[in-house]
Image (tube, rainbow, N blue to C red):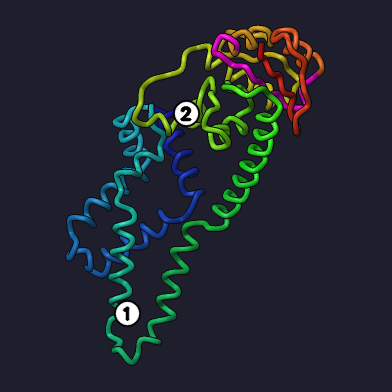
Amino acid sequence: MAELLRNAWIGWRDYTADGKLATLLLAVLLFLWLTGRWKKQGGLTLYTSLAVSGCILPVLAVFLMLYQTKFYDYEWIWSTVPLTAIIAYGIAVFWAEYCGEYKNGEWRKSVPLTMLLLLSMLLCANPGRMLSDSRAAKAERQQAQDVLKLLLTAVPEGEVCLWAPREIMEYAREADAGIRLPYGRNMWDASLNAYAYDVYDEKADLLYQWMTQTEAAGGEKAETESGEKTIPVEEAAAYALGAGVNCVLLPDDATPEMIKGMEAALGVEAQPLEGYYLFACYE
């Protein structure tokens, strides 16, 4: 129970860190209840208030998380809240209350309040973080596409099955739809599995964990752990070949021992490629 409460608290903290729409929602509900304006949309307001209480109060949030099963994270329980609808309704009621009395010739008097409401919605959505994330994602995508273009020109024409660090594999199909992968984005983004219960086999999981550990360690380790099982670089290479991989990319900060181990396991020489080492396994 303590772990579930902790997960609910961490989920709430992460959810509010992405924006303050939850704060705006609470302000809207407070306005509707205190002014009596909730009566016109009593069902919507009452349901939203109950749903929000269930998402915010830790004990109730735990029950909702148990109901939706551990397959989904805390953020998913907020799908029960009609956040956009109630915020739009509350702001419309607020604007009509204080600006609706102005006649056609006095519309300019409503401009300050209208601008204030729009600014409040914009700031609550945390545009600074979204802009920063957008720039970072754009730079990562561009770098990956540059690497992939060089890769496609460095290997013989034909079907490519690529095993690489996450930031490369995430954009591989954008660069060329013909590129095959031993696992996709749903390996690291669990939300993509929301409506599917198929899972990867153990070897695919080990491949992903091996590459992730290698990248995170800056090439200082040539093996990774999955539970109690540890696989060396030779075994990881064997799993990759078994999955049909014919192109492998490793970070350029990998140790010489790791590079030599991968060369021996794949039977090819490493080629420097824009911050990576390419191992092209073609007959």
Question: What residue did someone put label 2 on?
Answer: 186
Instruction: Give me the residue at 69% from left, 18% from top.
Output: 280
Q: Is residue 207 left or right of residue 201?
A: right
Q: Give the amino acid type for the residue marked by disc 1 in the picture.
A: Tyr
Instruction: Give me the residue at 67% from left, 40% from top.
Output: 143
Q: Is residue 103 above or below residue 67?
A: below
- Visible residue check, residue 7: yes
- The residue closer to the viewer here, 224 or 70, is 224
Question: Does the segment drawn in magenta span residue 244?
Answer: yes
Residue at the outermost right position: 256
Q: Is residue 44 left or right of residue 62?
A: left
For marks 1 and 2, give the one nearer the viewer: 2
- Visible residue check, residue 212: no
**Residue 215: percent from the left, percent from the top?**
68, 26
Question: Does the segment drawn in magenta span residue 228?
Answer: no
Question: Which stretch appears magenta?
Answer: 241-255
Question: What residue did someone put label 1 on?
Answer: 98
Instruction: Give me the residue at 59% from left, 45% from top.
Output: 137
**Residue 46: percent from the left, percent from the top?**
22, 54
**Under tag 1, what secondary structure?**
helix
| Disc on res. 213 | none
The numbered mark, 1 or 2, whose residue comes first in the sequence reads 1
Task: Give how far apart the Cα atoms at labels 1 and 2 are.
Answer: 48 Å
- The residue closer to the viewer here, 23 or 100, is 100
- Quadrant of the frame with the N terminus: top left
**Residue 72: percent from the left, percent from the top?**
38, 31
> Badge 1: few (under 14), some or many (20 or more) residues near its Cα, within 10 Å?
few
Q: Is residue 43 left or right of residue 178?
A: left
Q: Is residue 123 above or below residue 110?
A: above
Q: Give the amino acid type for the residue marked by disc 2 in the picture.
A: Asn
Residue 179, picture quadrant:
top right
